[in-house]
Image: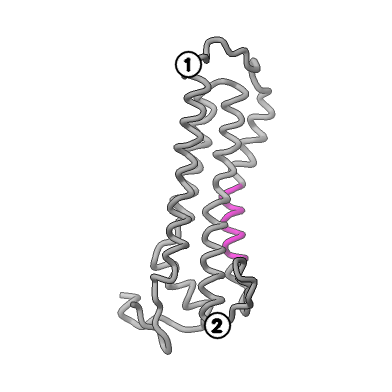
Amino acid sequence: MEQYQTESLDMSRFRQMYLVVSALPTILLLLTFVLWMMLEGPGAAESTGPEGMPVWQIALFGAIALASLPMALFVRRLGFKTTGDVIDPKSKKVLSGSDAVVQRIASTAIVGMAMPEIGLLLGFVACYLTENWLVYVPFAAYTILGWAIMYPRPSQVRAWYARQTGAEPVSSIIS
């Protein structure tokens, strides 16, 4: 348990957040498997799918996918600017104090991890429409990069908690 000026930070309070953000990248495996079954699996030779996709649409998909990571960073930064009470989505109760801070950090981290998924979904659609794996690969790679950047590291969670509560971590955490 990490110590801050007046209260301790129990990282186990973030266990559910870490479970959710760690499970989000499994969609890559699911979508890749679905594409593999559609494009390479049994019955693929008989399919008469679309002949392709206009280049301008692929470029538009790419631009939206590229914008998803900066938008995720912006949304995460915006989520941490707010302070005060929050409403628990499950119980509909108003949370205050450290409970509100934990809820805000968890929600913001999950939304931040989910936003890079936009590129993967666009790549899935583009690959399906073009029936070409090479279209899917850069979208998937950029999504993986986004997840690597957006994954909430414990040091980040501690810093977010400290900023939200107005407490500064003791020197043992910094060094």
Q: Residue at x 62, y 24 (%)?
A: 129
Disc ID at residue 42: 1
Q: Amino acid at mark 1?
A: Pro
Q: Residue at x 60, y 29 (%)?
A: 126
Q: Nearer the viewer, residue 2 or 74?
A: 2
User: Residue 64: horizontal and vertical position, in percent?
Assistant: 64, 41
User: Taking 18 as reference, is 91 left or right?
Assistant: right
User: Residue 91: horizontal and vertical position, in percent?
Assistant: 61, 70
Prevailing secondary structure of the magenta residues: helix
Q: Which residue is mark 2?
A: 97
User: Residue 18: horizontal and vertical position, in percent?
Assistant: 43, 60
The segment highlighted magenta reads 68-78
Disc with the residue nearer the chain's start (1 vs 2): 1
On screen, residue 171 above or below 157: below
Q: How far apart are the two marked residues, 1 and 2, measured between alpha carbons?
A: 56 Å
Q: Is residue 89 magenta?
A: no
